[in-house]
Amino acid sequence: MKKLINQPENVVVEALEGFALAHHDLVRVSLDPAYIVRADAPIRGKVAIVSGGGSGHEPMHGGFVGQGMLDAACPGAIFTSPTPDQILDATRAVNGGAGVLYIVKNYTGDVMNFEMAAELAGAEGIEVVSVVIADDVAVEDSLFTAGRRGVGATVLAEKICGAAAAAGRSLAEVAELCREVNAQARSMGMALTSCVVPQVGKPTFDLPADQMEIGIGIHGEPGRRRVPLAPVHEVVEMLIGPILADLPFRTGDAVLAFVNGLGGTPLIELYVVYQEVAKLCQEQGISIARNLLGSYMTSLDMAGCSITLLKLNADFQRLWDAPVHTAALRWGR
Amino acid sequence: MKKLINQPENVVVEALEGFALAHHDLVRVSLDPAYIVRADAPIRGKVAIVSGGGSGHEPMHGGFVGQGMLDAACPGAIFTSPTPDQILDATRAVNGGAGVLYIVKNYTGDVMNFEMAAELAGAEGIEVVSVVIADDVAVEDSLFTAGRRGVGATVLAEKICGAAAAAGRSLAEVAELCREVNAQARSMGMALTSCVVPQVGKPTFDLPADQMEIGIGIHGEPGRRRVPLAPVHEVVEMLIGPILADLPFRTGDAVLAFVNGLGGTPLIELYVVYQEVAKLCQEQGISIARNLLGSYMTSLDMAGCSITLLKLNADFQRLWDAPVHTAALRWGR
Amino acid sequence: MMTRDEILNWLTEFATLVAENRERLSELDAAIGDADHGANMYRGMQAVLAKLPILAAADIGTILKTAGTTLVSTVGGASGPLYGTLFLQFGGTTVGKMTLDLADWTAAWQAGVEGVTRRGKAEPGDKTMIDALVPAVEALRTALANGTSFNAALDAAAAAAEQGALATIPLSARKGRASYLGERSVGHQDPGATS
Amino acid sequence: MMTRDEILNWLTEFATLVAENRERLSELDAAIGDADHGANMYRGMQAVLAKLPILAAADIGTILKTAGTTLVSTVGGASGPLYGTLFLQFGGTTVGKMTLDLADWTAAWQAGVEGVTRRGKAEPGDKTMIDALVPAVEALRTALANGTSFNAALDAAAAAAEQGALATIPLSARKGRASYLGERSVGHQDPGATS
Ligand SMILES: Nc1ncnc2c1ncn2[C@@H]1O[C@H](COP(=O)(O)OP(=O)(O)O)[C@@H](O)[C@H]1O
Ligand SMILES: Nc1ncnc2c1ncn2[C@@H]1O[C@H](COP(=O)(O)OP(=O)(O)O)[C@@H](O)[C@H]1O
Ligand SMILES: [Mg+2]
Ligand SMILES: [Mg+2]
Ligand SMILES: [Mg+2]
Ligand SMILES: [Mg+2]
């Protein structure tokens, strides 16, 4: 296993220490239980947004904590959802009296742990609403858990809901917005290589040198199918096709296109992917009004990419453009 | 070869097309000859800063074009410096009448091509000063070219000089500042894996599963030595030791620490690296006043990292903090 | 009859089994994707072990509840809430007790399985640990009704659990939820440790 | 004597050699790191080939100068300015000529090598193509002084270049600039094609 780590069991906490040191201007970090909150939390009267999930997806979610996005992120062990007490402590730390939204990716573990945390927080009188993101068109009923997996739309929902909360919307409004983003977004991913979980030390699956996996999740779950390597314009067709068909996206739609790298993918390749996405969208009469390009939701060292399209409306677009200032996403002011 | 590309010979131009589409709000892109200029170039009366080099190092340099940093970037073929006519056209496009600074990484090809461009621009009456960055302590006389290679300090020099140019400093002042940054910065890198040049299709060098290369350059040049894999705290010691000794950095120094990923390195590992860098600096009584952490100067799909320390003074720090708004670096406003 | 010391031993034994099978559990989990189940359960049971010394004088309910909260707060993933709930429910039905007879034990498992079902929303036939747990509880209830001895009842429960787990094999490929392998391995050990 | 048609053939032949040895050149370059020399020279010489049709009627100076500017503007890296300069200097000394005698050819190479030296700042013994080029020019000059025939002079130059390249072998490992291999392959072909 080739990784820049010490003991495999210490990766998460050491990375969290590094995160705390590197971004002390933006966040406060608790190591035990592990959570990250924005430096100025809690914000009185603002709906707080908490997310979290297994580690190994960096910069998600810690890199999205800050002005205009998340109030807190709870990192679990590698590929393992956080525990209820992490989430509960983070919830207490960011609760500003206007309620707390949990943005939860649809995996059994994530859903159950956030549910337990919500019950505990509710018992303390903190109003919590959970919205589950499930945008992966690669699965109808996932191999991995009931229903579609939550992938790229999570990043978009966190940004858009973060802006809505900053603008003073109520918990019910922000939660409803989150459900709308989830309803209007579709994603699909592919892998050129598997990933190596530090405590396991070898690839989660074997992928021959001439094969790739289409419809992969973000934890090394099996994809929809394994196919021979192909030029990227064919790869993008394999991903965009199911995405467009599922919503469906139609001629005249304006979209936000999110091209995401999985951790081992160089940026130059993501630009090539983006160029193909733009070409295919144009062919369909779909205009890309906004884009996000980079490795924002990764799967350890996996090489590959995912594509997310969000059908934009004026509200989504305005909230997307609103200022954000986090470790991983920054614009406006 | 597992890459998200079409024909290997089209990677650079297709990535450039993707870059142009993704960042049309920030830059204008010429495909032939290939260069990227900020959308509002030329800025009358401002010193323009032009950099460039081989492709395969994304986001460097195109991702640094924009307000507060570069006016133009010239991407060459993969690992091949750009040609004089690319540089000359870019120079013409950004010349605002206050002169042009070329920031050149110290590789024979880069130096010669920028030199030829400077001669041609000079013949047209455009005042050009070139500053060569050479901060890699892994080499005294590189295997690859005369003198030290230019690596991480390039990113810092581009940011700091970009801010100085935006603040209205003269060409002579900005060039002198660039030399100072180069003089106060030291870097060293290491690789866990080699990289695959698309037109070659196989790794530039073979690195066994239990070995790593210390003192690597950014084009797959041989390192200072090949050693068995080790925990990251030892790896960081191997890099920080020569860096600290070379300037030398001393107790009481304030530094900017730049932890850079080489393209195939997941962010979680860079945070672990940063935590070790912070620990070692603290042990030496060196305070990290600013940091930059991410994959900003890559080597295609190489897994590994480089560390750059810049000894800060008040001027450097103020200019570092000044607003920057590019595809890859953003803060302030 | 089961004493508090036997309960403590049972937890220790389960922790040892998890530690020994850590890599195997992760390998089985890798078949469905994320290869973390071994590390998760190991982390949780080590945390439970660390709590045992301060539980030396506690009643069975406190011991089992502490095990449950410890699992919930250290495991995460799907198994944290599920195993945590199981033990929390065990603890809830055994508050203040220093020994358990077969009726106590049957009630504890019944509550545990109900808790897991509520939390995981899995039904029998969904190819989860429920498919092993439900028959085990049935077996305990039958044994109780028939006046079977404590040890014979545990053996019957283990056998039923094993059969239940085996019965999910054909569902595996067909329904494709594929939690199967992870399930089966854990399902086996759990009642196995029980008896 | 060399005619413009022979110059055009010589460029075509060189382009073919580069195309055939593309992978080998990159492999040799990989030894010093960046594995791009084959792709670079291939790109440049293909661009030169594409220019040849419009040069059908041009004089030798124009042909060689065009080759030079084309190499400079398409190759990049270290080899673009160096090969470009070589051909630009060839062209500069042969403006307006339709044939070259040995004196012309010697002057062209002399200017070319001076240009490369100025641009690359390499000295003999530095382990660069200069180590092959300088002896070749010496051989041409000697041949000219001795009144040797054109073809014999080219053979002598090629032999001198080869020897010069070989002489850098021991320097290789010691000085460690290691441009050696890339050098040698190209250095061989260049005068080789010349003769
Ligand atoms: N809804 C459910 N009901 C019961 N058991 C479940 C359910 N979902 C998952 N499981 C169990 O959880 C195990 C996975 O645990 P683990 O790998 O630790 O967490 P994660 O799935 O989050 O990575 C599965 O093998 C299965 O036994
Ligand atoms: N200073 C120099 N003088 C003469 N030739 C040089 C010099 N530096 C490099 N070269 C030549 O350039 C070759 C490398 O060319 P190439 O691989 O195309 O560019 P780069 O080195 O920029 O990747 C070397 O093999 C060597 O022949
Ligand atoms: Mg998991
Ligand atoms: Mg090169
Ligand atoms: Mg798992
Ligand atoms: Mg080269």
Image (cartoon, coloured by chain):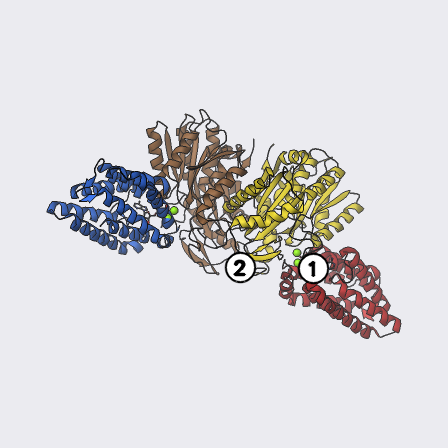
Chain colours: A brown, B yellow, C blue, D red
Residues under numbered marks 2 and 1 in contact, where contact means CB atoms less than 8 Å apart? no
Is B314 located above or below residue A245 in the figure?
A: above
Give the chain letter at badge 1. D
Residue B196 seen anywhere in this rendered image of the structure: no
Determine whether the residue tagged by mark 1 lies in a helix, strand or loop. Answer: loop
Q: Which residue is mark 2?
A: B1
Same chain under badges 2 and 1? The reply is no
What residue type is disc 1 on? Answer: Arg
Is B258 located above or below residue A303 in the figure?
A: above
Give the image location of residue B171, x and y in percent.
Answer: 75, 38
Q: Residues within 10 Å of mark 1 (few under 14, many from 20)?
A: some
Determine whether the residue tagged by mark 2 lies in a helix, strand or loop. Answer: loop
Give the image location of residue A79, x and y in percent.
Answer: 41, 46
Ligand 2 quarter of the rendering: bottom right
Identify which residue, A292 or C149, lies in the foreground. Answer: C149
* Front label number (2 vs 1): 1
Q: Residues within 10 Å of mark 2 (few under 14, many from 20)?
A: some
Identify which residue, B101 or A327, lies in the foreground. Answer: A327
Give the image location of residue C124, x and y in percent.
Answer: 24, 47
What residue type is disc 2 on? Answer: Met
Q: What is the quadrant of the N terminus of chain C in the image?
A: top left
Q: Which residue is mark 1?
A: D177
Give the chain letter at badge 2. B
Q: Is residue B120 left or right of residue C150?
A: right
Q: Residue at x 56, y 33 (%)?
A: A332
Residue D147 seen anywhere in this rendered image of the structure: yes
Q: Residue at x 58, y 50 (%)?
A: B238
Q: Which mark is residue B121?
A: none
